[in-house]
Image: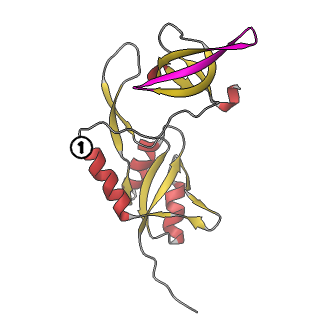
């Protein structure tokens, strides 16, 4: 029987929605190496203009493990943990260099732009501003934090230009 040594590596752990802090704290209490990169963003609440820390990748944290079965189960038993990200062959590791790059990025005070929040065809709702409450279909990014949302009326579409921060994607169950 061949014996092989399990070497620790970083893995992305999918969490329940808005459970990133709970999972991170749970893993740290179990003495596991967890990393939850956070960035500063303007609060989207209308009644305040605070800067708040939010996860860089909502719904994901990073955990360093050698994937021995006992530790793997302990990770998945953590409240809010869903699964390690991977494919049919199992979890896929993330390089130490990528994790170190993330640590360097979040240590700076410079704003960090992440991937697109919306893709063409997403059902969205305008939640703030003069068009608040209007639902439509995301058309495209216009630049400088602006987006175009197509709103259907009388069987035709009219495009409105709104701030990206004023728009939220509708959950698929509401479609």
Task: Give residue 99's position: percent from left, percent from top.
Answer: 36, 57
Q: Position of residue 77 (x, y in %)?
A: 54, 55
Residue at position x 61%, y 62% in the image: 87
Q: Which residue is mark 1?
A: 108
In terms of secondary structure, what is the magenta stretch mainly?
A: strand
Q: Residue at x 65, y 64 (%)?
A: 88
Q: Is residue 31 visible?
A: no
Residue 71 within the segment the image draws in magenta: no
Q: Which residues are magenta?
A: 143-158
Q: Which of the 4 image quadrants contains residue 48?
A: top left
Colour logic:
secondary structure
The foreground one among 93 and 151 is 151
Residue 9 falls in image quadrant: bottom left
Question: Residue 50 location in percent, x, y?
Answer: 30, 22
Let me know if residue 144 is in the magenta part: yes
Residue in view at x 49 percent, y 58 percent: 75
Q: Nearer the viewer, residue 14 or 102?
A: 102
- Identity of the residue furthest to the bottom in this view: 1
């Amino acid at each position: 029987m061949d014996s092989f040594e399990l070497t620790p590596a970083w893995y992305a752990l999918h969490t329940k929605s808005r459970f990133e802090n709970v999972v991170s704290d749970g893993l740290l209490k179990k003495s596991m190496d967890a990393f939850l990169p956070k960035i500063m963003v303007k609060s989207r609440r209308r009644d305040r203009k605070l800067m708040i820390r939010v996860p860089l990748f909502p719904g994901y944290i990073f955990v360093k493990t050698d994937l021995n079965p006992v530790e793997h189960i302990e990770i998945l038993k953590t409240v809010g943990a869903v699964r390690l990200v991977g494919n049919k062959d199992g979890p896929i590791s993330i390089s130490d260099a990528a994790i170190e790059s993330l640590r360097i990025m979040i240590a700076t005070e410079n704003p960090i732009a992440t991937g697109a929040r919306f893709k063409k065809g997403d059902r969205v709702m305008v939640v703030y501003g003069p068009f608040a409450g209007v639902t439509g279909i995301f058309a495209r990014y216009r630049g400088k934090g602006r987006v175009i949302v197509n709103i259907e009326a009388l069987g035709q579409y009219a495009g409105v230009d709104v701030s990206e921060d004023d728009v939220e994607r509708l959950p698929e169950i509401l479609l």
